[in-house]
Amino acid sequence: LNVVNTNSIDLNGVAAGTCQIWGWSYRNVPGNGLDQIGEPLSSLDDLDCSDISDNAVTVIREAADGGTVAIDLEATGNPNGTTSFNGDTEVVICLDERPDPIVVVHENDSPNLSYRYVITDEATGLILNVVNTNSIDLNGVAPGTCQIWGWSYRNVPGNGLDQIGEPLSSLDDLDCSDISDNFVRVIREAADGGTVSIDIDATDAIGEGTTIVTGDNSVTILVGDGIGNPVVVQHENDSPNLTYRYVITDSSDDSTILNIVDSNEIDLEAAGLGTCQIWGWSYRGLGASIPDFIGQPLQVLRDEDCSDISEDFVEVIRTDVLAVDDAAQINVELSVYPNPTTDFINISLTGVNNGYSVNVYSVTGQIVKSERYTSQENRLQVSDLSNGMYLLEVVDTDSNTRSVKRFIKR
Protein backbone atom coordinates (compact mmCIF):
# COMPACT_ATOMS: atom_id res chain seq x y z
CA LEU A 1 0.00 0.00 0.00
CA ASN A 2 2.83 2.41 0.76
CA VAL A 3 6.51 2.64 1.76
CA VAL A 4 7.42 5.43 4.21
CA ASN A 5 10.65 6.74 5.69
CA THR A 6 9.17 7.75 9.10
CA ASN A 7 8.25 5.62 12.07
CA SER A 8 5.28 7.90 12.93
CA ILE A 9 2.50 6.63 10.72
CA ASP A 10 -1.02 8.18 10.68
CA LEU A 11 -3.63 6.05 8.92
CA ASN A 12 -6.60 8.32 9.43
CA GLY A 13 -8.16 9.36 6.15
CA VAL A 14 -8.09 5.86 4.67
CA ALA A 15 -10.96 3.41 4.57
CA ALA A 16 -11.77 0.99 7.36
CA GLY A 17 -9.87 -2.27 7.19
CA THR A 18 -6.75 -4.03 8.50
CA CYS A 19 -3.18 -3.44 7.41
CA GLN A 20 0.29 -4.64 8.42
CA ILE A 21 3.40 -2.55 8.96
CA TRP A 22 6.67 -4.38 8.17
CA GLY A 23 10.24 -3.30 8.62
CA TRP A 24 12.46 -3.26 5.48
CA SER A 25 16.26 -3.26 5.44
CA TYR A 26 17.89 -2.56 2.02
CA ARG A 27 20.60 -0.81 0.01
CA ASN A 28 20.47 0.76 -3.44
CA VAL A 29 16.88 -0.12 -4.44
CA PRO A 30 15.67 2.19 -7.22
CA GLY A 31 12.71 4.32 -6.09
CA ASN A 32 13.26 3.27 -2.46
CA GLY A 33 10.48 0.69 -2.84
CA LEU A 34 7.82 3.03 -4.20
CA ASP A 35 8.03 1.22 -7.54
CA GLN A 36 6.74 -1.91 -5.76
CA ILE A 37 3.47 -0.31 -4.50
CA GLY A 38 0.65 -2.57 -5.61
CA GLU A 39 2.94 -5.62 -5.76
CA PRO A 40 3.14 -8.52 -3.27
CA LEU A 41 5.45 -8.02 -0.27
CA SER A 42 7.73 -10.71 -1.68
CA SER A 43 8.65 -8.35 -4.53
CA LEU A 44 10.75 -6.41 -2.00
CA ASP A 45 12.01 -9.44 -0.09
CA ASP A 46 13.39 -11.01 -3.29
CA LEU A 47 15.57 -8.03 -4.23
CA ASP A 48 19.37 -8.09 -3.72
CA CYS A 49 20.50 -6.58 -0.40
CA SER A 50 16.89 -6.45 0.79
CA ASP A 51 15.14 -8.12 3.73
CA ILE A 52 11.67 -7.85 5.30
CA SER A 53 11.20 -8.07 9.10
CA ASP A 54 10.33 -11.40 10.70
CA ASN A 55 7.06 -9.99 12.01
CA ALA A 56 4.58 -7.21 11.36
CA VAL A 57 2.56 -4.70 13.33
CA THR A 58 -1.15 -5.22 12.62
CA VAL A 59 -3.25 -2.04 12.47
CA ILE A 60 -7.04 -2.48 12.59
CA ARG A 61 -8.70 0.61 11.18
CA GLU A 62 -12.34 1.03 12.31
CA ALA A 63 -14.80 3.90 12.02
CA ALA A 64 -17.35 4.15 14.80
CA ASP A 65 -20.48 2.33 13.60
CA GLY A 66 -23.67 2.24 15.66
CA GLY A 67 -25.09 -0.36 13.28
CA THR A 68 -28.55 -1.67 14.10
CA VAL A 69 -30.22 -2.86 17.31
CA ALA A 70 -32.97 -5.40 17.99
CA ILE A 71 -34.60 -7.33 20.83
CA ASP A 72 -33.27 -10.82 21.48
CA LEU A 73 -36.76 -12.31 21.73
CA GLU A 74 -35.67 -15.70 23.03
CA ALA A 75 -33.34 -14.30 25.69
CA THR A 76 -35.89 -11.69 26.80
CA GLY A 77 -38.74 -14.17 27.00
CA ASN A 78 -41.80 -13.42 29.10
CA PRO A 79 -40.89 -14.39 32.67
CA ASN A 80 -43.96 -12.90 34.37
CA GLY A 81 -46.45 -13.10 31.53
CA THR A 82 -46.47 -9.30 31.42
CA THR A 83 -44.28 -8.64 28.36
CA SER A 84 -45.52 -8.47 24.76
CA PHE A 85 -43.63 -7.83 21.54
CA ASN A 86 -44.48 -6.02 18.32
CA GLY A 87 -41.75 -7.57 16.21
CA ASP A 88 -38.15 -7.35 17.40
CA THR A 89 -37.97 -3.57 17.83
CA GLU A 90 -41.00 -2.76 20.04
CA VAL A 91 -41.99 -4.17 23.41
CA VAL A 92 -44.69 -3.40 25.98
CA ILE A 93 -43.90 -4.09 29.64
CA CYS A 94 -46.14 -3.82 32.69
CA LEU A 95 -44.50 -1.94 35.53
CA ASP A 96 -44.69 -3.82 38.81
CA GLU A 97 -42.23 -5.04 41.45
CA ARG A 98 -40.99 -7.98 39.40
CA PRO A 99 -37.99 -7.67 37.06
CA ASP A 100 -38.53 -8.40 33.39
CA PRO A 101 -35.40 -7.13 31.57
CA ILE A 102 -35.26 -6.47 27.85
CA VAL A 103 -32.25 -8.12 26.19
CA VAL A 104 -30.98 -6.01 23.29
CA VAL A 105 -28.48 -7.11 20.65
CA HIS A 106 -26.67 -5.20 17.92
CA GLU A 107 -24.92 -5.72 14.59
CA ASN A 108 -22.18 -3.37 13.42
CA ASP A 109 -18.87 -3.14 11.58
CA SER A 110 -16.61 -1.92 14.38
CA PRO A 111 -16.28 -4.87 16.77
CA ASN A 112 -13.08 -3.55 18.37
CA LEU A 113 -14.54 -0.21 19.48
CA SER A 114 -16.58 0.26 22.65
CA TYR A 115 -20.33 -0.31 22.43
CA ARG A 116 -23.01 0.77 24.90
CA TYR A 117 -26.75 1.34 24.90
CA VAL A 118 -28.30 4.79 25.21
CA ILE A 119 -31.82 5.18 26.63
CA THR A 120 -33.74 8.27 25.56
CA ASP A 121 -37.18 9.63 26.36
CA GLU A 122 -39.36 9.39 23.26
CA ALA A 123 -41.35 12.52 24.11
CA THR A 124 -38.36 14.83 24.57
CA GLY A 125 -35.50 13.02 22.82
CA LEU A 126 -33.26 13.59 25.84
CA ILE A 127 -30.78 11.00 27.11
CA LEU A 128 -32.02 9.24 30.27
CA ASN A 129 -29.13 6.83 30.77
CA VAL A 130 -26.15 5.12 29.14
CA VAL A 131 -25.57 1.48 30.12
CA ASN A 132 -22.83 -1.04 29.38
CA THR A 133 -25.10 -4.10 29.59
CA ASN A 134 -27.52 -5.39 27.00
CA SER A 135 -29.95 -6.68 29.67
CA ILE A 136 -31.99 -3.62 30.55
CA ASP A 137 -34.66 -3.67 33.28
CA LEU A 138 -36.93 -0.62 33.29
CA ASN A 139 -39.15 -1.61 36.20
CA GLY A 140 -39.01 1.00 38.92
CA VAL A 141 -39.33 3.94 36.53
CA ALA A 142 -42.47 5.90 35.71
CA PRO A 143 -44.86 4.94 32.90
CA GLY A 144 -43.93 6.29 29.51
CA THR A 145 -42.15 5.39 26.28
CA CYS A 146 -38.41 5.27 25.80
CA GLN A 147 -36.03 4.34 23.00
CA ILE A 148 -32.91 2.21 23.30
CA TRP A 149 -30.16 3.10 20.81
CA GLY A 150 -26.81 1.48 20.14
CA TRP A 151 -23.67 3.61 20.52
CA SER A 152 -20.25 2.82 19.04
CA TYR A 153 -17.35 4.97 20.27
CA ARG A 154 -13.79 5.22 21.50
CA ASN A 155 -12.23 7.41 24.20
CA VAL A 156 -15.27 9.48 25.23
CA PRO A 157 -14.76 10.92 28.75
CA GLY A 158 -17.37 9.58 31.18
CA ASN A 159 -18.48 6.93 28.65
CA GLY A 160 -21.49 9.08 27.79
CA LEU A 161 -22.73 9.64 31.34
CA ASP A 162 -21.77 13.31 31.05
CA GLN A 163 -24.36 13.63 28.28
CA ILE A 164 -27.34 12.48 30.38
CA GLY A 165 -30.09 15.10 30.05
CA GLU A 166 -28.74 16.24 26.68
CA PRO A 167 -30.16 15.49 23.20
CA LEU A 168 -29.01 12.26 21.53
CA SER A 169 -27.14 14.37 18.95
CA SER A 170 -24.68 15.39 21.69
CA LEU A 171 -23.22 11.87 21.47
CA ASP A 172 -23.57 11.46 17.73
CA ASP A 173 -21.58 14.67 17.10
CA LEU A 174 -18.52 13.54 19.09
CA ASP A 175 -15.34 12.37 17.34
CA CYS A 176 -15.14 8.59 16.89
CA SER A 177 -18.78 8.22 17.92
CA ASP A 178 -21.82 6.90 16.07
CA ILE A 179 -25.44 6.17 17.04
CA SER A 180 -27.31 3.16 15.60
CA ASP A 181 -29.52 3.57 12.56
CA ASN A 182 -32.60 2.41 14.49
CA PHE A 183 -33.86 1.98 18.05
CA VAL A 184 -35.87 -0.39 20.23
CA ARG A 185 -39.07 1.19 21.53
CA VAL A 186 -40.10 0.22 25.07
CA ILE A 187 -43.65 1.14 26.15
CA ARG A 188 -43.85 1.16 29.94
CA GLU A 189 -47.35 0.93 31.37
CA ALA A 190 -48.62 0.38 34.90
CA ALA A 191 -51.99 -1.35 35.18
CA ASP A 192 -54.62 1.40 35.43
CA GLY A 193 -58.29 0.58 35.98
CA GLY A 194 -59.13 4.21 35.27
CA THR A 195 -62.82 5.10 35.39
CA VAL A 196 -65.96 3.47 34.02
CA SER A 197 -69.29 4.92 32.95
CA ILE A 198 -72.40 4.07 30.98
CA ASP A 199 -72.43 4.79 27.26
CA ILE A 200 -75.83 6.43 27.63
CA ASP A 201 -76.74 6.75 23.95
CA ALA A 202 -75.80 3.15 23.13
CA THR A 203 -77.58 1.77 26.21
CA ASP A 204 -80.75 3.78 25.58
CA ALA A 205 -80.85 2.67 21.96
CA ILE A 206 -80.75 -1.01 22.92
CA GLY A 207 -82.95 -1.01 26.03
CA GLU A 208 -85.57 1.60 25.26
CA GLY A 209 -88.62 1.00 27.40
CA THR A 210 -86.93 -1.54 29.72
CA THR A 211 -83.82 0.42 30.71
CA ILE A 212 -83.70 3.65 32.69
CA VAL A 213 -80.32 5.40 32.82
CA THR A 214 -80.24 7.68 35.86
CA GLY A 215 -76.71 9.02 35.43
CA ASP A 216 -73.30 8.11 34.07
CA ASN A 217 -72.89 5.39 36.69
CA SER A 218 -76.38 4.15 37.54
CA VAL A 219 -78.96 2.28 35.52
CA THR A 220 -82.18 0.42 36.29
CA ILE A 221 -83.20 -2.48 34.08
CA LEU A 222 -86.35 -4.58 33.89
CA VAL A 223 -85.62 -8.28 34.33
CA GLY A 224 -87.80 -11.36 34.18
CA ASP A 225 -89.60 -10.47 30.95
CA GLY A 226 -87.30 -12.48 28.69
CA ILE A 227 -86.22 -9.39 26.79
CA GLY A 228 -82.52 -8.54 26.75
CA ASN A 229 -81.53 -5.05 27.83
CA PRO A 230 -77.73 -4.81 27.73
CA VAL A 231 -75.90 -2.06 29.54
CA VAL A 232 -73.08 -0.63 27.39
CA VAL A 233 -70.13 0.34 29.56
CA GLN A 234 -67.08 2.40 28.54
CA HIS A 235 -63.81 3.22 30.26
CA GLU A 236 -60.97 5.73 30.27
CA ASN A 237 -57.49 4.81 31.46
CA ASP A 238 -53.78 5.34 30.86
CA SER A 239 -52.69 1.81 29.93
CA PRO A 240 -54.13 1.22 26.45
CA ASN A 241 -51.72 -1.62 25.64
CA LEU A 242 -52.65 -3.79 28.62
CA THR A 243 -55.71 -6.04 28.72
CA TYR A 244 -59.00 -4.54 29.92
CA ARG A 245 -62.08 -6.44 31.07
CA TYR A 246 -65.17 -5.77 33.17
CA VAL A 247 -65.73 -7.36 36.57
CA ILE A 248 -69.30 -7.87 37.82
CA THR A 249 -69.69 -8.01 41.60
CA ASP A 250 -72.57 -8.05 44.03
CA SER A 251 -73.21 -4.99 46.19
CA SER A 252 -71.93 -6.55 49.43
CA ASP A 253 -69.22 -4.88 51.49
CA ASP A 254 -66.48 -7.07 49.99
CA SER A 255 -67.91 -6.88 46.44
CA THR A 256 -67.89 -10.61 45.67
CA ILE A 257 -66.92 -11.31 42.06
CA LEU A 258 -69.84 -12.81 40.10
CA ASN A 259 -68.30 -12.80 36.63
CA ILE A 260 -65.54 -11.33 34.49
CA VAL A 261 -66.37 -10.45 30.88
CA ASP A 262 -64.38 -9.17 27.91
CA SER A 263 -67.30 -7.37 26.27
CA ASN A 264 -68.49 -3.89 27.22
CA GLU A 265 -72.07 -4.83 26.29
CA ILE A 266 -73.38 -6.60 29.39
CA ASP A 267 -76.83 -8.19 29.52
CA LEU A 268 -78.06 -9.10 33.02
CA GLU A 269 -81.59 -10.14 32.05
CA ALA A 270 -81.07 -13.68 33.40
CA ALA A 271 -79.51 -12.54 36.69
CA GLY A 272 -82.81 -12.04 38.54
CA LEU A 273 -83.68 -9.25 40.95
CA GLY A 274 -80.97 -7.43 42.84
CA THR A 275 -78.20 -4.87 42.51
CA CYS A 276 -74.73 -5.44 41.09
CA GLN A 277 -71.69 -3.37 40.28
CA ILE A 278 -69.61 -3.32 37.10
CA TRP A 279 -65.95 -2.43 37.60
CA GLY A 280 -63.15 -1.94 35.08
CA TRP A 281 -60.06 -4.17 35.35
CA SER A 282 -56.67 -3.42 33.76
CA TYR A 283 -54.15 -6.26 33.87
CA ARG A 284 -51.56 -8.37 32.06
CA GLY A 285 -50.70 -12.05 32.43
CA LEU A 286 -53.66 -13.19 34.56
CA GLY A 287 -56.06 -14.46 31.92
CA ALA A 288 -55.61 -18.14 32.79
CA SER A 289 -56.47 -17.40 36.43
CA ILE A 290 -59.84 -15.76 35.75
CA PRO A 291 -62.00 -18.77 36.78
CA ASP A 292 -60.19 -18.85 40.15
CA PHE A 293 -61.19 -15.25 40.92
CA ILE A 294 -64.95 -15.79 40.56
CA GLY A 295 -66.54 -16.05 43.99
CA GLN A 296 -63.65 -14.18 45.62
CA PRO A 297 -63.72 -10.61 47.01
CA LEU A 298 -62.79 -7.89 44.53
CA GLN A 299 -59.72 -7.18 46.67
CA VAL A 300 -57.99 -10.31 45.31
CA LEU A 301 -57.68 -8.58 41.93
CA ARG A 302 -56.32 -5.41 43.49
CA ASP A 303 -53.65 -7.46 45.26
CA GLU A 304 -52.31 -9.14 42.11
CA ASP A 305 -49.17 -7.89 40.35
CA CYS A 306 -49.82 -5.89 37.19
CA SER A 307 -53.51 -5.55 38.09
CA ASP A 308 -55.69 -2.54 38.90
CA ILE A 309 -59.42 -2.01 39.46
CA SER A 310 -61.24 1.14 38.33
CA GLU A 311 -61.75 4.00 40.75
CA ASP A 312 -65.52 3.80 40.38
CA PHE A 313 -68.21 1.38 39.21
CA VAL A 314 -71.49 1.28 37.34
CA GLU A 315 -74.44 0.32 39.53
CA VAL A 316 -77.07 -1.85 37.85
CA ILE A 317 -80.40 -2.17 39.65
CA ARG A 318 -82.34 -5.19 38.39
CA THR A 319 -86.05 -4.81 39.13
CA ASP A 320 -89.49 -5.94 38.02
CA VAL A 321 -91.23 -2.75 39.21
CA LEU A 322 -90.82 -1.27 35.75
CA ALA A 323 -93.39 -3.81 34.60
CA VAL A 324 -96.18 -1.54 35.95
CA ASP A 325 -97.96 0.01 32.97
CA ASP A 326 -97.66 3.75 32.56
CA ALA A 327 -101.05 3.89 30.87
CA ALA A 328 -103.74 5.47 33.00
CA GLN A 329 -106.08 2.97 34.62
CA ILE A 330 -108.60 5.67 35.42
CA ASN A 331 -110.12 8.32 33.23
CA VAL A 332 -107.62 11.02 34.10
CA GLU A 333 -104.88 12.90 32.36
CA LEU A 334 -101.75 12.85 34.57
CA SER A 335 -98.70 15.03 33.89
CA VAL A 336 -95.47 14.99 35.92
CA TYR A 337 -92.78 17.62 35.23
CA PRO A 338 -89.93 18.54 35.13
CA ASN A 339 -88.55 15.11 34.42
CA PRO A 340 -85.70 14.54 35.24
CA THR A 341 -85.79 16.80 38.28
CA THR A 342 -83.52 17.81 41.15
CA ASP A 343 -85.80 19.50 43.74
CA PHE A 344 -89.51 19.04 42.99
CA ILE A 345 -92.04 17.76 40.51
CA ASN A 346 -95.29 19.37 39.46
CA ILE A 347 -98.31 17.07 39.39
CA SER A 348 -101.13 18.07 37.07
CA LEU A 349 -104.22 15.95 36.42
CA THR A 350 -107.86 16.15 35.42
CA GLY A 351 -110.76 13.81 36.05
CA VAL A 352 -110.41 13.53 39.84
CA ASN A 353 -113.22 15.18 41.83
CA ASN A 354 -112.69 14.48 45.54
CA GLY A 355 -108.93 14.39 45.92
CA TYR A 356 -106.27 11.73 45.53
CA SER A 357 -103.28 10.13 47.21
CA VAL A 358 -99.74 10.20 45.83
CA ASN A 359 -97.24 7.43 46.57
CA VAL A 360 -93.62 7.46 45.42
CA TYR A 361 -91.99 4.03 45.01
CA SER A 362 -88.30 3.18 44.71
CA VAL A 363 -87.25 0.68 42.05
CA THR A 364 -87.23 -2.00 44.73
CA GLY A 365 -90.94 -1.44 45.37
CA GLN A 366 -90.69 0.46 48.66
CA ILE A 367 -92.84 3.52 49.35
CA VAL A 368 -90.46 6.39 50.05
CA LYS A 369 -92.95 9.27 50.08
CA SER A 370 -96.74 9.68 50.45
CA GLU A 371 -98.97 12.75 50.20
CA ARG A 372 -102.66 13.52 49.85
CA TYR A 373 -104.03 16.36 47.69
CA THR A 374 -107.43 17.81 46.85
CA SER A 375 -106.51 20.25 44.07
CA GLN A 376 -105.59 19.20 40.57
CA GLU A 377 -102.31 21.18 40.49
CA ASN A 378 -99.71 20.40 43.16
CA ARG A 379 -95.97 20.46 43.79
CA LEU A 380 -94.19 17.53 45.43
CA GLN A 381 -90.76 18.08 47.00
CA VAL A 382 -88.28 15.31 46.12
CA SER A 383 -84.96 16.97 47.00
CA ASP A 384 -84.57 14.60 49.94
CA LEU A 385 -84.64 11.51 47.70
CA SER A 386 -81.51 9.81 46.48
CA ASN A 387 -80.68 10.10 42.80
CA GLY A 388 -82.35 7.43 40.72
CA MET A 389 -85.55 6.31 39.04
CA TYR A 390 -88.91 6.35 40.88
CA LEU A 391 -92.55 5.53 40.22
CA LEU A 392 -95.20 8.09 41.12
CA GLU A 393 -98.62 6.52 41.79
CA VAL A 394 -101.83 8.53 41.89
CA VAL A 395 -104.78 6.79 43.63
CA ASP A 396 -108.27 8.24 43.08
CA THR A 397 -110.13 8.63 46.41
CA ASP A 398 -113.52 7.77 44.96
CA SER A 399 -112.71 4.78 42.78
CA ASN A 400 -109.50 3.56 44.42
CA THR A 401 -108.05 3.10 40.92
CA ARG A 402 -104.66 4.42 40.00
CA SER A 403 -102.35 5.92 37.41
CA VAL A 404 -98.53 5.60 37.34
CA LYS A 405 -95.72 7.71 35.91
CA ARG A 406 -91.96 7.26 36.05
CA PHE A 407 -89.63 10.11 36.96
CA ILE A 408 -85.89 10.49 37.50
CA LYS A 409 -84.33 12.33 40.43
CA ARG A 410 -80.84 13.73 39.77
Image (cartoon, rainbow, N blue to C red):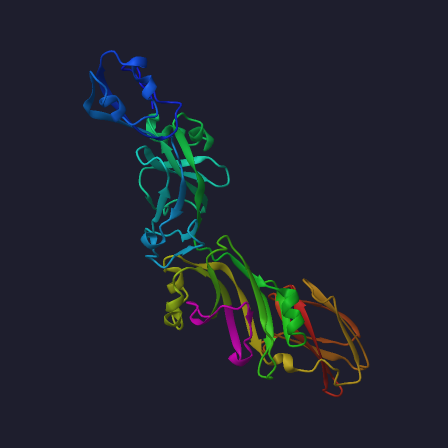
User: Is residue 177 shown in magenta?
Assistant: no
Image-based side of 118 in relation to 24, left or right: right
Q: Position of residue 26 (x, y in %)?
A: 22, 15
Quarter of the image for residue 348 reads bottom right
Q: Position of residue 310 (x, y in %)?
A: 48, 59
Q: Is residue 25 above or below residue 108?
A: above
Q: Residue furthest top?
A: 28
Question: Is residue 132 shown above or below 372?
Answer: above
Q: 333 or 46: nearer the eye? A: 46
Q: Residue at x 32, y 36 (%)?
A: 111
Residue 207: give x, y in percent of width and height.
Answer: 64, 74
Residue occupying the far bottom of the picture: 399
Magenta stretch? 252-277
**Front one among 236 and 121:** 121
Q: Is residue 245 visible?
A: yes
Q: Is residue 264 magenta?
A: yes
Height in image: 53 above or below 241? above
The residue shown at (39%, 25%) is: 14
Any part of residue 272 in sight:
no
**Point 51% across, 60% down: residue:** 312
